[in-house]
Amino acid sequence: MSGTRDVMVAGVGLAPFNLYDGQKGRPLKDYFDLGAESILKALDDADLGWGDIQAAFCGNVYGGTASGHQAIEKIGQTGIPIVNVENACSSGSSAFRLAYQMVGAGIYDVVLAAGFETLPKGLLKSTAWPEWQRIMGFNVQPAAYAMNTVRYMQETGATEEDISRVTVKNRKNGALNPNARFRKPVTLEEVMASRMIAQPLRLLHACPLADGGAAVILCSRDRLKKTDKPVTVAASILTSGTYGHVYGGGSVKKKTPDTVQISVEQAYEASGYGPEDMDVVQAYDTMASGELWELEKMGFCPKGEAPRLMREGYFDLGGKLPVNTDGGLMSRGHPLGATSLAQIIEIYRQIRDEAGQRQVPGAKIGLAHAMGAGPNSAVVILKR
């Protein structure tokens, strides 16, 4: 978006990720309750009132018609345009991109991006695949990731232990995050001993489902109230798949670009930064193995090198490039509509030096990446 004005992050809000089913002493909340809670927190953080918001883009997957309207109705009906965004697991970052474009183009000065979800129990019945593929079970996420993982292991020599280290790292980080669903660290032995769900993936290689809400308010520089440590959106990119591409690297006859690589290359070009400039990263870890190949695809290391760097602590909280400092999906949980906005919020808090015990010293630039069925790939880079 060359030639556009600066877009600033005015404030953020999170409704803690958990189960809100009314069982075992847990409160009963629906997605619109969690959405409203996160929006009110973002307004408070931005030092803005609801009347300042000129437009809203709301990410949600399983809420049904007018989900954003239902969340916003609990705050106030002011006649603003509300656009509901369903883009699978990247719904929140897709809403963020639309808000970013609106402010950047000068159409509005203060815009809300929100995401929220309460999920059904068990395996999600995704409709993102053609019906014949669904009948054959292709849309069962653990199985799909298991096939990709087998290929990755064969091509790189990665082991089940390497994959398990991702879970150990992220659960350790999540113990420092009060908004995470799982806040108990796990050992390598515990991960390796958890039951197999889709060989070679085990239960503790899979992120937990969760309910939750997240909200980010974007504004023009002149409308920013929090002028200390201002955070600018350096890039917000969304891409989809390419013809002939299969997970693992192209068709048999011709290699076609991977959507992750396309999105991150566009983000680096738009921002003027590269992988070597990032101080902190949020990688999409819906399955532990995915974090390894995503880091490689985004240029943080050559293919096959992520397992070695993981073993050496390179991606740890105290390592050279901390990844998923808030615990990632593996610890925080995965309420689909809210997930990618929560990733962005963690980058925002890190580069404003507001991440508490999990703070990366001196963090000034960070990247958040989310994947969604389709496929979609969304990359956001924030800078201070």
Image (tube, rainbow, N blue to C red):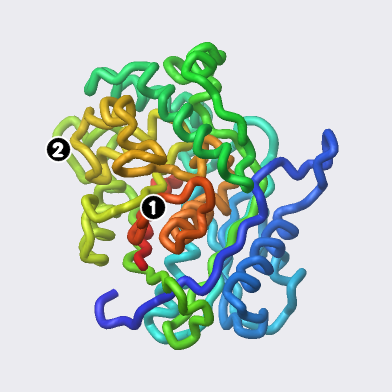
Q: Is residue 295 left or right of residue 51?
A: left
Residue 269 picture quarter: bottom left
**Which percent across, then down, holds residue 70?**
72, 65
Between disc 2 and disc 1, whose residue precedes? 2
**Which percent across, then down, holds residue 29?**
78, 51
- Closest to the observer: 84 or 37? 37
- Closest to the observer: 85 or 359? 359
Q: CA distance from mark 2 to mark 1?
A: 44 Å
Q: Secondary structure at mark 1?
A: loop
Q: Residue furthest left?
A: 254
**Which percent across, then down, holds residue 83?**
57, 70
- Residue found 30% across the figure and 35% down from its top: 314
Numbered label attached to residue 338? none
The residue that disc 1 covers is 361
Residue 97 picture quarter: bottom left
Q: Is residue 17 above or below residue 159?
A: below
**Which percent across, then down, holds residue 168?**
47, 27
Q: Is residue 7 above or below residue 315?
A: below
What type is the residue that disc 1 sits on?
Pro
In the image, which is nearer the foreground, mark 2 or mark 1? 1
What type is the residue that disc 2 sits on?
Lys
Which quarter of the rendered picture does the C terminus lie within?
Answer: bottom left
- Closest to the observer: 51 or 128? 51
The residue that disc 2 covers is 254
